[in-house]
Image: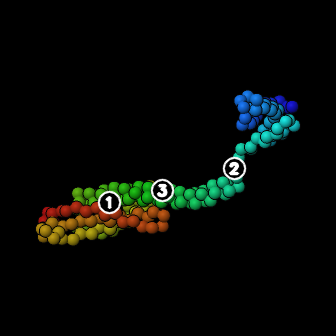
Amino acid sequence: MTNGERRMKIEVRNVKWGNGDAGKRRDSLLLCRSGSSSRRFPGPRSIAIPESGFTLAEVLAAMLFMAIVIPVAMQGLQIASRAGVVSERKALAARLAESKLNELVVTGEWQSSSTKGTIYEGLQSYPWVLESEPWSVDGAMRLLTVRVAVPVQGQDYDVQVSTLVDATQ
């Protein structure tokens, strides 16, 4: 026997239906076990120790399950990632639109300046458009809207910020 092998002695008891202890018989079997293989040594009764492992059907079922679950999980992660990028870019666009709208209102440029342009943030450029229309409730007020377009993975998203200004001033 090598160092990695273990010896086991298994007692097998057979009980014959009869009168008490007279019907009992004891058999012993010496087994040698090494790793995943087992060998039987001859004895009065020989039994086989079942090997542990998975059947082919279990392995195939697990592979089929994984073939279904992994693509669905990856698609879910891709959608979540895209939603995160879109919301991050929209928040940036809202901040830029609000900043541009405040600049146009404070300086009064909304009345005379061009109605479109480009905002540069880092290495990215974001086009903006100013829309001015009379407010339907009060003719003396104007509704100013700045729209900023943000590209996300080949698709443009518009973010708009609006405010009211007094046109008489």
**In this view, 49 is above or below 96:** above
Q: Which mark is residue 109?
A: none
From the viewer's side, name the closer residue of 156 and 17.
17
- As drawn, 137 above or below 15: below
Q: Going by the image, does 146 lie left or right of 66?
A: left
Badge 2 marks a residue whose secondary structure is: loop
CA distance separating discs 1 and 2: 61 Å
Is residue 32 shown above or below 122?
Answer: above
* Residue 52 can be seen in this image: yes
The quarter of the picture where residue 117 lies is bottom left
Amino acid bearing label 3: Ser
Residue 131 occupies quadrant: bottom left
Tell me which numbered mark, 1 or 3, is placed earlier along the sequence: 3
Check disc 1 and report the residue beneath it: 97
The reply, left or right, for residue 143 in relation to residue 91 is left
Label 3 or label 2, whichever comes before in sequence order: 2
Residue at position x 72%, y 37% in the image = 17
Q: Quadrant of the N terminus?
A: top right
Q: Which residue is mark 2?
A: 54
Question: In the rendered structure, are the residues bearing label 1 and label 2 in contact, judged by CB atoms less than 8 Å apart?
Answer: no
Q: Residues within 10 Å of mark 1 (few under 14, many from 20)?
A: many
For disc 3, the marked residue is 81
- Amino acid found under the numbered disc labelled 2: Phe
Judge whether residue 85 can be spotted in this image: no
